[in-house]
Image (spheres, rainbow, N blue to C red):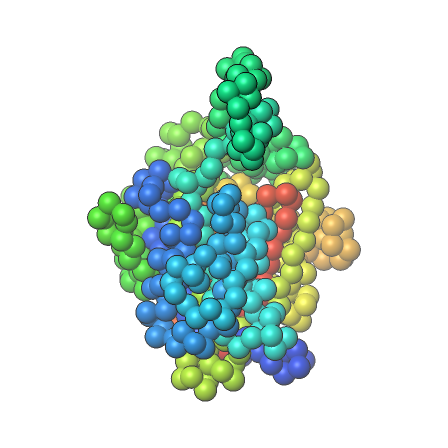
Amino acid sequence: MSETTARNNGPAYSYQPPKGRRAVIVAGLRTPFVKAFAEFLKLDTIALGDACVRSLLEKTEIDRNAIDAIVWGGVILPGLAPNVAREIALDLRLPAHVEGHTVTRACASGLQAITQAAAAIERGECDVAIAGGSDSTSNAELKLPQKVVHALAPLAFGKATPKDYLGVLAQLMPLSEVLPKMPKIAERTTGEVMGESAERMAERNEISREAQDEFAARSHHRAAAGIASGRLRREICKVETPDGKTVTSDTIVRADTSVDKLAKLRPVFAKGGTLTAGNSSALTDGAAAVLLMSEEKARALGYTPLAFFRSWAYRGVDPADQLLMGPALAMPAALAKAGITLADCDLVDMHEAFAAQVLSVLKMLGSDAFAKARLGRDKAVGEVDPARLNVYGGSVALGHPFGATGARMVTTMANELHESRRRFALLGICAAGGLGAAAVLERADS
């Protein structure tokens, strides 16, 4: 037996699905990921979810009556219809019994939706579920100052008289205090935007600008190679926009970028800093979804199970410490729950909010001191082989629609495990609020 085969087969593990019932991923699909305020400008998060789920239904030819639920992840939720999952079910005229609920765990929302659906299947609550997420930064609702909301509420909810209108106008002065404010993606507790936190992480963990640019260039090159080979194209559905355009491919990936080109970009989060638009993920619009079933149901309906969740874990850290270090805690926890080690993982897929954040987490995983201080272990979790890390690039190259990224990662890793006959993939996602998410996927027929 070759070393590779031995690693893929692995030792005999004692893991057993809850009550012997296992949720499996049978398919995944996503829209193209495009920069915000571009091709998908007139598609809000529900419309993007509609497009993705509709294509998934067509691709899999699943009997709509067999679907029990939709679980959807999102961060920028529409104020008048925040339960995006149910809106998708209604828009697509799925049977009335298809329940839908929406979850949010910042940038880990897509993974949260999928693991929640998997848990429901394994608990026997349902047999077939669609799970994923979407976000449209282009259609984020502008926040009115609370002073305006309070002043206008009597007009919106009551029968206003001319005197009431005059009274409201008097409250809305000076005008500079009541104009809509530009949305700021900042931590509520610290007031710090994520890029500023990542900049501090880069300095604290001694991540150089050069290392970040090298990582970003590699992400673009691997994503471009995945697209050119057709491997990533198979995971993308076309989207028809209201203005008659058909979008069929990602628009952020740059096959021709280089470390030299990236080195010319100016820092964007701190004077003299190291984070640029080139080594950070862009504001992105898009959606991604997977189809999950109980293993018995999948085989009864003739679907090929691709992978299942061996474990997952979510952890929190103090946002004022290192906001984006969550995966350094969640990934070891997921490995421990799965009963395997980092060395057993054939693939590692980590969300790239920023190159500096990924490189910081990799340092933490490889540090004995971090393991002792934060994990209660004597030895480091281990070094991640660059050849196994983000083999088709990541969010720096592909983009990052907040609620969709987790489903995008699950789709790519489930397909890769199935097609390459590898066994384990470890996923890691950082998220606002100091959250970390992780999961271990295992090839279904391993």
Residue 114 position within the rendered picture, expressed as x and y whole percent measured from the top left = 53, 63
The spot of residue 304 in percent (x, y) is 42, 80
* Identity of the residue drawn at 56% across and 75% down: 126
Question: Front-most of 170 and 24?
Answer: 170
- Residue 337 higher or lower than 432, as above or below: below
Residue at the top extreme of this rendering: 174
User: Residue 375: where, in percent of width, then height?
Assistant: 74, 54
Q: How many marks?
A: 0
Residue found farthest to the left: 244
Give x and y (percent) for residue 116: 59, 64
Look at the picture and state if 61 lies above or below 191.
below
Along the line of sight, which residue is nearer the eye, 128 or 438? 128
**Residue at the image point whose x is 66% and y is 78% from the top:** 18
Q: Residue at x 49, y 45 (%)?
A: 80
Q: Quadrant of residue 124?
A: bottom right
Q: Is residue 446 visible?
A: no
Task: Tell me the quarter of the picture where residue 54 sits.
Answer: bottom left
Q: Is residue 216 above or below residue 420?
A: above
Is residue 199 found left or right of 305 in the rendered image?
right
Q: Tell which of 95 and 374 is nearer to you.
A: 95
In the rendered image, the vertical position of residue 173 relative to residue 210, given as above or below: above
Q: Is residue 107 visible?
A: yes
**Residue at image point 47% right, 37% down:** 141
